[in-house]
Each structure stands twice: as structure tokens, then as C-alpha cells.
Amino acid sequence: MLDLDLIFNGANLFVLPFWLMMIVLPKWGLTQKVIASYLPFVPLTLLYLSLFILTLDPESAAAFSNPTLSVIAQLFSQEKIALTGWVHFIVLDFFVGRYIYLAGQRTGVWTIHSLILCLFAGPLGLLSHIVTTWIMNKDSQPEETQVI
């Protein structure tokens, strides 16, 4: 039997050093090297894949293929599915945080506030970074859009 609390806590603890590196030590060579790599995402995505496979059954597949809010709420009341969703959030928030960090390193845009927001509320951190970039670049020529 899986210890879902242990997996939940482990996933949360796994990403914290990366967030701390990006927020507290953004110019450190090790931070730049580690965050530039996709390797930190491998354990998290493998965990997500494992949980996804374990939670996929005809009921959840049907719910996710044609979702309604009430059905999704009912599914997420199951701990295993809530954990799968949480790991999904962690992976995507970390990926967006990585994007913000790397963009800041490349352009010189200040990112600490956006990274902190992204850690706790991913989309708000992304919005913060977009607004900060606009403000810092409002008097300069716009850069070409770079695809991630």
C-alpha cells in the first residue's frame, strides 16, 4: 500500500532546494547549471506518470475525457487523485518558475518576487513576471518572442 502522505511530503520537499536556489542564490554557478538542466524534472514526471497510471480507471478516464466541475470535484475528493493533481501542479509551477528564472538571467529582469509568487500560486508568478518585464522594457525596443 502506498503511503500517500509520504509521497506528498517527499514531492514537496524535492522541489524546495531548486526554488531556494533560484530565489536566494540566482547568480551561483551551481544554480545556473542545475536549473538550466531538465534533469530535476525527471523524478517528478516519473512520479506523476506512476500516480497517473495508478489512478487511471474507466471512471476517471471518462471524467477527464468530458469533465464537469462536479465530477472533477468528486474525483479530487479521492486522496490518490488529489495527490496526482498536486504533483501535476508542482511540476508545472516548477517549470514556469524555471522559465521565469532563465528569462531573468538572460534579460536582467528582476525575478525574486515573481518566483516567490510562482512557488505559491504559479499563474500569479507568471503574470508578475510578464508585468515586470513590460515595465522594465517599456522604454526599450521589444525583443523577439522566444519559444520555450
Image (spheres, helix red, strand yellow):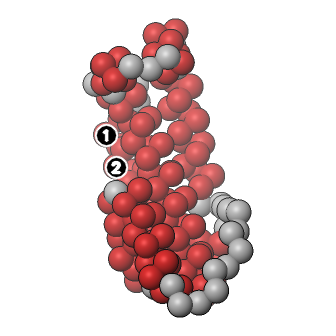
Report if the CB atoms under discs 2 and 1 are less than 8 Å apart: yes
Occupied quadrant, residue 112: bottom left
Q: Nearer the viewer, residue 133 or 83?
A: 133
Question: x, y (%) of residue 58?
Answer: 52, 9
Q: Locate the N terminus and report the quarter of the image it occupies.
A: top left
* Vertical position of residue 133 compared to residue 8: above or below: below
Residue 32 percent coordinates (x, y): 61, 80
- Dot label at residue 9: 2
Give amino acid for label 1: Asp
Residue count near mark 1 (Cα–Cα under 10 Å), binned few <14, some 14–19, many ≥20 = few
Q: Residue 62 vs residue 77: left or right?
A: right
Pick the front one: 83 or 135:
135
- Which amino acid, mark 2? Asn
Residue 29 position, x and y percent, is: 60, 87
Which residue: 55% across, 59% down?
A: 95
- Find disc 1 in the rendering and name its residue: 5
Residue 76 vs 102, above or below: the answer is above
Is 104 situated left or right of 90 in this image? right
Residue 124 image offset from top left, x and y in percent:
37, 60
Q: How many marks?
A: 2
Element at label 1: helix
Q: Residue at x 44, y 51 (%)?
A: 90
Residue 50: quadrant of the picture: top right
Q: CA distance from mark 2 to mark 1?
A: 6 Å
Q: What's the mark number on residue 135?
A: none
Q: Secondary structure at mark 2?
A: helix
Q: Quadrant of the C terminus?
A: bottom right
* Label 2, residues with CA under 10 Å away: few <14, some 14-19, many ≥20: few
Relative to 82, residue 43 above or below = below
